[in-house]
Amino acid sequence: MADERCVKVSLEGPVAVLSMEFAPHNLLGPDLMAGLRAGLAEAGGCGARAVLLKSGLRHFSAGADTSLFFGAAQGAEGLSVSPLAFLRELESFPLPIVVAIQGVCIGGGLELALACDFILAARSAKLGSIEVTIGINPLMGAIQRQVQRAGIARAKEMSMLGRRYDAETLERWNIINRVVDDEKLDAAAMAVALELANGPTLAHSITKQIAHLAAAHGVEAADEAMAQLQLPLWQSEDLRIGLESLQKNGPGLAVFKGR
């Protein structure tokens, strides 16, 4: 697979691995966003059924490229790319995205992680929304996504105090999914990605849509849209495989094809 300047892309079985290598600190700006977009496009076109996003450097990401701040100060026309639109692309990406965080993950780096589906962090990782230290709020939706995950009190604490937190604290707050020992991070993240990749791909995509709809508009809106969103499932090969396996072998033994 291709080797982008900022993001190296490889295929490990059904998992597309996107490794950010934008030295020195994976600052999230136009270059890294373009690399990630290219990596996701490649993942979607090569038959991958899940994505693992990680860093090939010491830290996951030390925040946003300062060009985003200066561009935002000039208004929308000052930005070559909308950071919020970019993160919404990640949220709506049809494949599950697992994030493995090591080292520092702050500012825009944390916002990048929050736009993905599963976050695993090394025990020594430090995470936080530190934008207040330069006099601004998070620009890419961290506040509202922290409200969704941890509630308004924790979201205000994170963005108004601008502290860095240990991974175990943010696991308790439901900001991240799981903390693992540093030396086990790669294997644990790949295990989750493989489990997702070997599952029913279409069902996962629809689950993402329903979950985001419920988070944004409430349970009633999700209830009303659910049947329409699930229509493609009834014609899927994976459903046929799942039902046949249930009848012959019992639950949990289906081998899905991702179709």
Image (tube, rainbow, N blue to C red):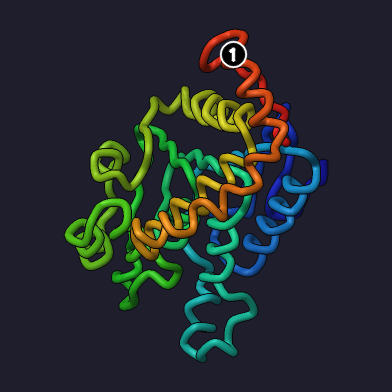
Please determine whether, in this image, residue 76 is positioned above or below residue 204: below
Q: Residue at the spot x=67%, y=30% of the render?
A: 238
Report if residue 38 is visible in the image.
yes
Along the line of sight, the residue nearer the viewer: 214 or 5: 214
Q: Is residue 63 rendered to the left or right of residue 86?
A: left
Q: Quadrant of residue 236?
A: top right
Q: Residue at the spot x=35%, y=68% of the render?
A: 131
Q: Is residue 139 rendered to the left or right of residue 136?
A: right
Report if residue 54 is visible in the image.
no
Q: Is residue 87 rendered to the left or right of residue 178?
A: right
- Considering the image in quadrants, where does the N terminus appear? top right
Q: Residue at the spot x=65%, y=18% of the render?
A: 244
Residue 240 horizontal/vertical position (percent): 68, 27
Residue 146 horizontal/vertical position (percent): 32, 57
Please determine whether, in this image, residue 207 is positioned above or below residue 243: below
* Residue located beneath label 1 in the image: 247
Residue type at numbered disc 1: Gln
Residue 60 horizontal/vertical position (percent): 50, 47
Residue 25 horizontal/vertical position (percent): 53, 54
- Considering the image in quadrants, where does the C terminus appear? top right
Q: Is residue 214 rendered to the left or right of residue 82?
A: left
